[in-house]
Image (cartoon, rainbow, N blue to C red):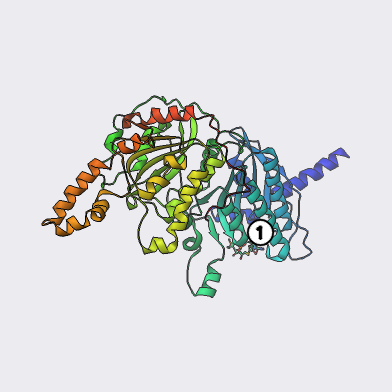
């Protein structure tokens, strides 16, 4: 009697675990993709996965769609480096991982659990979108997921891996999560596929060009990370999780990194060229000041004129924001403002201090930027810094002109500790632009205008473009020897660890989206 029951369970289990069947599993492998269960096994600590809703089936009365255990997704919980997480992984072998009523309910249940427990939720997407045969029930299921994405936002970390087609409705839920990672040549995200594009716009475009990992990693910014393969994808997710707390009520763990908090770097100043118009790689400076040079960059390929990412300093998780003089001279534009603003908001939500390194000539001028909304997007950065109540430490290492000085974590946006290198140039305009305006008449009448301009620019730089006027006014707290940047920032992080900064009650702000 017992034996029969156990036998039935074993048969059902085997059937459920084979998803859409051996043939479809082989088809999945032949496309270079792992199955939903293989992916979960790679993501979680070995042997920790507990599957939920394994025997759920669709309830559609359409006889053309097979009833299969699991119905389009594998969901459950397990651990990553010993920390609890919930997961859902679309099963492409079952009706192309399409989302019907019951697949939607499974995913919603996993999300509800993650919210109750207060732990990250990780979604692995490989899906043809709304299940066509289930009609409005499929659309409603998406609505349920989107609602949960919005409720979970800022409460628990939400991470998405796009490893296969993410078509139609399957794209919006990832976009509402905190981080999207796409696998090259496998992950594809699009609202309407190439066939529709051809029909409506008569444009020929491949899946990869339209919505591949490179397109979303570098052009649209939908993908925060691009991984070479599925193995790298799951390694990145595990590393990302290591910087984060379980939820918004906790702080990220302090980790013993073995790097001396008092370590100085006498070579740091030499990375900065003596000529302020010469390019250099800000990542060299970032890597020098963080623990073990271990920088986990976010949006590496998108809006490269600003660099954002996670690191540890004195063992604490920090979010780094830094202008990158190698691209657009480090000027702020639409994409870099949006990129940094969203990253700051993420850090603030999850109690991760923000460390800002400034070297920017200002906001990028021109009709392209103005007409596409630099005012709207550029001000997001101001909004994000103002809103953030986590410890905020800013270090001006080079140029900090005009609006960009204010936007990049200035004192009056409520940064806590503002440092500057002796090389810092803080002014309303850069020397050349400033003298053109304030000495217009002198330059017009000068016998040798270029030489006069050069002389006036030097005088301006000596008089205004230094950190000492700002230090006199107390908007720079300390002018430091660059070699001491790391110990100064770490001491400030320690000092600010228990910072509290109450804000007026509101339902929510109205950030200029
Ligand atoms: C039902 C689907 C499906 C879907 C795929 N399948 N998508 N079944 N509903 N949305 C089924 C296929 O019929 C096929 O079944 C199996 O899954 C595998 O699909 P293939 O096409 O053979 O795989 P592949 O060649 O890899 O192509 C994958 C694909 C393609 C690019 C995703 O299937 C596709 O274009 N699907 C439709 C995408 C789409 O338009 N979805 C609806 C979007 S509208 P068999 O039995 O033949 O193996 C939407 C609205 C929501 O989502 C809006 C909310 C805001």
Frontmost residue, 372 versus 281: 372
Quadrant including the N terminus: top right
At a point 41% along the width and 33% down the height, the residue shown is 290
Frontmost residue, 373 versus 231: 373
User: Residue 320: x and y, percent?
Assistant: 44, 40
| Residue found at the far left of this picture | 447
Some atom of ligand 1 lies within 8 Å of the CB belonging to the residue at label 1: yes
At a point 27% along the width and 42% down the height, the residue shown is 464
User: Residue 122: x and y, percent?
Assistant: 61, 45
Q: Quadrant of residue 393?
A: top left
Task: Please give the residue where the numbered disc 1 appears in the rendered image.
Answer: 98
Label 1, residues with CA under 10 Å away: few <14, some 14-19, many ≥20: many
Does residue 279 appear to the left or right of 167 in the view shown? left
Q: Quadrant of ligand 1?
A: bottom right
Q: Quadrant of residue 265?
A: top left
Frontmost residue, 374 versus 77: 374
User: Residue 172: x and y, percent?
Assistant: 59, 57
Does residue 232 appear to the left or right of 52 in the view shown? left
Residue 176, above or below 462? below
Residue 274, visible in the rendered structure: no
Residue 360, above or below 137? above
Residue 483, visible in the rendered structure: yes
Residue 242, above or below 435? above
At a point 37% along the width and 41% down the height, the residue shown is 283
| Residue found at the far front of this picture | 441
- Count the marks: how many? 1
| Residue found at the far right of this picture | 1
- Which structural element holds mark 1? loop
User: Residue 41: x and y, percent?
Assistant: 61, 41
Q: Quadrant of residue 3?
A: top right
């Amino acid at each position: 009697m017992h034996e029969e029951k156990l036998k039935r369970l074993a048969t059902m289990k085997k059937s459920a675990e084979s998803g859409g069947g051996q043939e479809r599993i082989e088809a999945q492998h032949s496309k270079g993709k792992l199955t939903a269960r293989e992916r979960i096994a790679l993501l979680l600590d070995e042997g920790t996965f507990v599957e939920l809703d394994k025997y759920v089936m669709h309830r559609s009365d359409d006889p053309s769609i097979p009833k299969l255990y699991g119905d389009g997704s594998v969901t459950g919980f397990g651990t990553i480096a010993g920390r609890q997480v919930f997961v859902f992984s679309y099963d492409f072998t079952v009706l192309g991982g399409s989302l019907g009523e019951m697949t939607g309910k499974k995913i919603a249940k996993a999300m509800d659990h993650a919210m109750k427990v207060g732990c990250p939720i990780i979604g692995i997407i490989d899906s043809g979108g709304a299940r066509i045969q289930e009609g409005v029930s499929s659309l409603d299921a998406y609505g349920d997921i989107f609602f949960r994405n919005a409720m979970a936002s800022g409460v628990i970390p939400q991470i998405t891996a796009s490893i296969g087609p993410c078509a139609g409705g399957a794209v919006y839920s990832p976009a509402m999560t905190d981080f999207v990672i796409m696998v090259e040549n496998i992950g594809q995200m699009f609202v309407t596929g190439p066939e529709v594009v051809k029909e409506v716009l008569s444009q020929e475009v491949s899946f990869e060009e339209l919505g591949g990992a490179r397109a979303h990693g570098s052009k649209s910014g939908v993908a925060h990370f691009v991984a070479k393969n599925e193995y790298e994808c799951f390694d990145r997710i595990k590393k990302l999780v290591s910087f984060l707390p379980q939820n918004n009520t906790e702080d990220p763990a302090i980790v013993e990194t073995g790097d001396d908090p008092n370590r100085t770097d006498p070579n740091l100043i030499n990375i900065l060229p003596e000529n302020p118009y010469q390019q250099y790689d800000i990542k060299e400076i970032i890597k020098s000041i963080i623990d073990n040079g271990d920088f986990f960059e976010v949006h590496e390929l998108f809006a490269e004129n600003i660099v954002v990412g996670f690191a540890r300093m004195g063992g604490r998780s920090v979010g780094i924001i830094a202008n990158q003089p190698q691209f657009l001279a480090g000027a702020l534009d639409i994409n870099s403002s949006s990129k940094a603003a969203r990253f700051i908001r993420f850090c603030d939500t999850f109690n991760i201090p923000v460390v800002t390194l400034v070297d920017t000539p200002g906001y990028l001028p021109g009709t392209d930027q103005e007409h596409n909304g630099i005012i709207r997007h550029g001000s997001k950065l101001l909004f994000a810094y103002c809103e953030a109540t986590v410890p905020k430490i800013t270090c001006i290492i080079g140029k900090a002109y005009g609006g960009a000085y204010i936007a990049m974590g200035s004192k009056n946006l409520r940064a806590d500790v503002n440092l500057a290198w002796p090389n810092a140039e803080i002014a309303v305009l850069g020397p050349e632009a400033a003298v053109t305006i304030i000495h217009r008449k002198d330059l017009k009448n000068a016998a040798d205008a270029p030489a006069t301009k050069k002389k006036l620019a030097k005088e301006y730089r000596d008089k205004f473009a230094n950190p000492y006027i700002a230090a006199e006014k107390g908007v720079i707290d300390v002018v430091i020897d660059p070699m001491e940047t790391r110990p100064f920032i770490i001491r400030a992080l320690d000092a600010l660890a228990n910072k509290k900064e109450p804000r007026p009650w509101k339902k929510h702000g109205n950030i200029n989206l």
